Structure formats: C-alpha cells, structure tokens
Amino acid sequence: MLKLLADENFDNTVIRELLRRNPDIDIVRVQDVGLSGEDDPTMLIWAAQENRVLFTHDVATITRYAYERRTQGQSMPGVIEVSVDAPIGRVIEDILIILECSFAGELEGQIQYLPL
C-alpha cells in the first residue's frame, strides 16, 4: 500500500474519513512530523526520503517543485492534488480506489489530480 503525507492545509475531514473507512492507511500530516510552516521543496524532500506520496490542495506551487525534482533526477514518490471545491465524498472514494489499486512506488514521478 502507498504511504501518504498530507500537506499542512489538507482537509482533515478527508483524512479522518479515510482512516475511519480503513484504519490501516499509512498517512501522516505535515504537522505530525515537524514540518509545519516549511516550504514546498522541504516537504517534497521529506516525502521522498520517507517514500510518501504527498496529498495537497496547493496546485499553484507544488506542481512546479515536483516537476523540478523530476527534471533534476531526484526522487519524487508522487503528488495527488485535490481540488478544494471537489465534493468530499467523491475525493474520499477516489483516494480509496487509488490506494486499493496502486502498488508502492507506482506513482513515482507522477502528479495526479482529484477528482478522477
């Protein structure tokens, strides 16, 4: 199963519901690992070191930094960008599908957008 990192501003309602539906999901929040207030490149470095796919609502800057890591040949386990106005139920279902159908490392170098 994929390991996940939720960006500081990621909707905690989504995280709570994911864990309610599947308590085995390996997800940590930026706040839980001492990265509160850190910039995007720092979060991506930590995610790469821990092999965690980053969940974010930040489509403005994360995308650029994630692609920069790719072009520089650095690890980037994946980013899933979730639209802030997407229906929460749909986002939760999409994430559960991704988790069920993806192998560790499968999203390496990719940016996915939700809802699907």
Image (spheres, grey):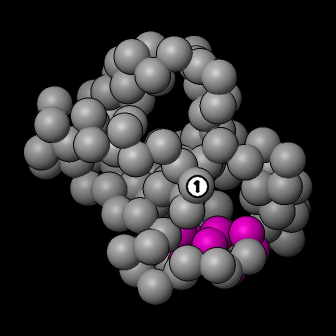
Instruction: Examine the rendering and report whether any part of residue 101 can be seen.
Output: no
Q: Which residues are magenta?
A: 40-48
The furthest residue to the bottom? 34
Q: Amino acid at mark 1?
A: Asn
> Which of the two residues, 80 or 12, is positioned nearer the viewer here?
12
Give the residue pinned by disc 1: 9
Residue drawn where x is 64% and y is 78% of the image: 37
Q: Name the quadrant containing residue 101.
A: top left
Q: Position of residue 108 (x, y in %)?
A: 58, 51
Along the horizontal axis of the image, is 18 left or right of 94?
left
Q: Position of residue 103 (x, y in %)?
A: 35, 41
Tally of numbered tags: 1
Residue drawn where x is 84% and y is 55% of the image: 61
> Which of the two residues, 30 or 66, is positioned nearer the viewer here?
30
**In magenta stretch: residue 79:** no
Residue drawn where x is 65% and y is 22% of the image: 85
> Which of the two residues, 27 or 77, is positioned nearer the viewer here?
27
**In magenta stretch: residue 47:** yes
